[in-house]
Amino acid sequence: MPNRFKEIPVVDGHGDQLTLYEIRERGPLLGLIPKTRFELGTGEAVEAQGDDFVIVGTGEKLTRVETDD
């Protein structure tokens, strides 16, 4: 089964807006719980921490940008 992607707009500590990708990886067997991971378009790994996110390699905090969706 293919992976699913969701785009999440975030802002860093400098006020720059970035796109974070939530990637749901599906297992090859039915019934497996999908694994979810986060990364920036640059490939940097990101972890969810409460309502915010943190870049794993730098510790920089990213905040979700509220949208009208």
Image (spheres, rainbow, N blue to C red):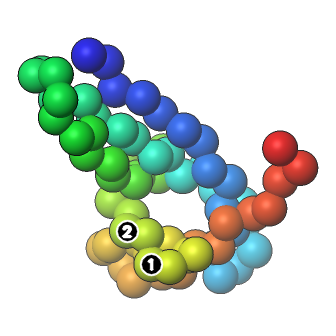
Residue 57 percent across, percent down from the top left = 30, 73
Q: Tag 1: residue type?
A: Gln
Q: Residue furthest right?
A: 68
Query: Which residue was labeled with disc 1?
Result: 49
Residue 51 percent across, percent down from the top left = 58, 75
Residue 24: quadrant of the picture: top left
Residue 65: quadrant of the picture: bottom right
Of 16 and 27, nearer the camera is 27
Q: Is residue 44 visible?
A: no
Of 9 and 28, nearer the camera is 28
- The answer to whether mark 2 and mark 1 are in CB contact below 8 A is yes
Q: Which mark is residue 21?
A: none
Q: Is residue 51 left or right of residue 54?
A: right
Q: Relative to 21, does residue 17 appear above or below in the rendering?
A: below
Residue 9: quadrant of the picture: bottom right
Q: Residue furthest left?
A: 29
Q: Residue at x 33, y 51 (%)?
A: 37
Q: Tag 2: residue type?
A: Glu
Residue 40 percent across, percent down from the top left = 46, 52
Query: Which residue was labeled with disc 2?
Result: 47
Of 11 and 29, nearer the camera is 29
The N terminus, quarter of image: top left
- Crowd rating for badge 1 (residues with CA inside 10 Å; few <14, some 14–19, many 20+): few
Q: Residue at x 27, y 39 (%)?
A: 34
Which SS class for mark 2?
A: strand
Q: Relative to 17, does residue 49 appear above or below in the rendering?
A: below
